[in-house]
Amino acid sequence: MTTQVIPSVDRSRLGALLAITEAPRVSVVMPVNHLDPQHDAIRARGLGARLRVLLEPHAVDQAVADHLLATVEERFGHLHPIPHAIGAVALYATPSGSEWLLLPVRIRETVTVAEEFHLLPVIDAVDPAHCFVLTLARGGNALWRANRWSVEPVTLPGAPGALSEITRFRELEKQLQFHQSARGGAAVFHGHALGENREMEPVRAYLRRVDQALGAALAGDTAPVLLVGPGSLPGMFRDISTHNRIVDHPIEIHPDGVDASHLHEFARPVVDALVADRTQRFLDRVGMLREPRRSSTLSAEIVVAAALGRVDTMLFDPDADNCGVVNRAAVAALRHAATVLSAPGLPTGAAATYRW
């Protein structure tokens, strides 16, 4: 039996796990304790003991079972050091092989041996909700894509260089107020009636070039864009931008010295708001379709409908799986090409709309 390590998870990885037909299917998921690595080593032995008990009723070759148990104790018992962005680790296995996944999610410990993998953590990890973060500074600009878990850089094709390279920028600086930012001592500037000052036209021309690069980078993606920059720059960019989903309130701070983790802190409320809005709009639709019996908030009903291919869209709370029923419903729905999305805090645990 071989083990494949998957350093990051995307929808193609989820699809590969769904395509596995061999049984039984073993799922072992454990949240990472970054503060007490020794505690994780102790828990790993407990996971192995639980898995041994669950394997007994299944006709698994003893050598395969022993190898799987050893893999669990080795992998889960020697996690550290591990990147802080990893919230949980998961092992998905069948008698012929296994995959080791590093997940950004925080989820409770789970050990199952069943007809289906416990895939709610993976579905949660590939949540498509996202926004963009555009940093603006006199030294240059950068674009990031942020989801619920992390941020990653995005290329800005054709973006101009440093703002300080534009004509007469040093003279323009003299017209601006300066104060020192709290982070790193970088100069933050605020203008006087910049929209009325012709001397600021080179700055606006520069920002238009940034906006053109942003449009090329987004390539039609309509996700919101959060601006991070000092003083008047975000407001000036918002005024000239052709992108119609600029976040209302920018982060007015000089981005020099601001690392990816802080950018994610800025972006996370934007993404959370997208998820909350998505959930509320879906629940409104569930209510509209309840009378013709084309929706449900009962997991026992949803799992039956999912097995029949009736589910069109399903939302679930990652922390509210009812004895595996929600997981079975989600997996069955995905096998029938339904849309399945995470909805943290969903009061009913699951909700679905039906195709018929």
Image: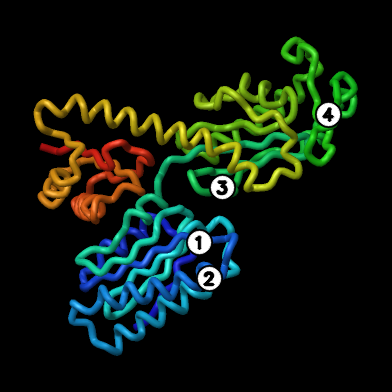
Kindly state the secondary structure of the residue where label 1 is placed.
loop
State the count of labels. 4
**Discs 3, 4 touching: Cβ within 8 Å:** no
The mark found on residue 151 in the picture is: 3
Give the spatial CA distance, label 1 vs label 4.
52 Å
| In front of the other: 186 or 81 | 81
> What is the secondary structure assignment of the residue under circle 4?
loop
Indicate which disc, 3 or 1, sits on the residue closer to the N terminus. 1
Q: Which SS class for mark 3?
A: strand
Q: In which image quadrant can residue 27 be found?
A: bottom left
What is the spatial separation of the Cα atoms under label 3 and label 1, in whole angstroms?
A: 20 Å
Residue appearing at x 35%, y 48% in the figure: 319
Check if mark 4's residue and mark 2's residue have beta carbons within 8 Å: no
For the residues marked 3 and 4, what is the alpha-carbon distance in whole angstroms?
33 Å
Is the residue marked by circle 2 packed among few (<14), some (14-19), or many (20+) residues within 10 Å?
some
Residue placed most toward the observer, 318 or 44: 44
User: Please, what is the three-letter code of the amino acid marked with disc 1?
Assistant: Val
Residue 32 is marked as 1
Image quarter (top left, top right, bottom left or bottom right) of the C terminus: top left
Left or right of 302 on screen, residue 83: right
Measured from the top left, where is residue 124 in percent x and y?
A: 38, 50
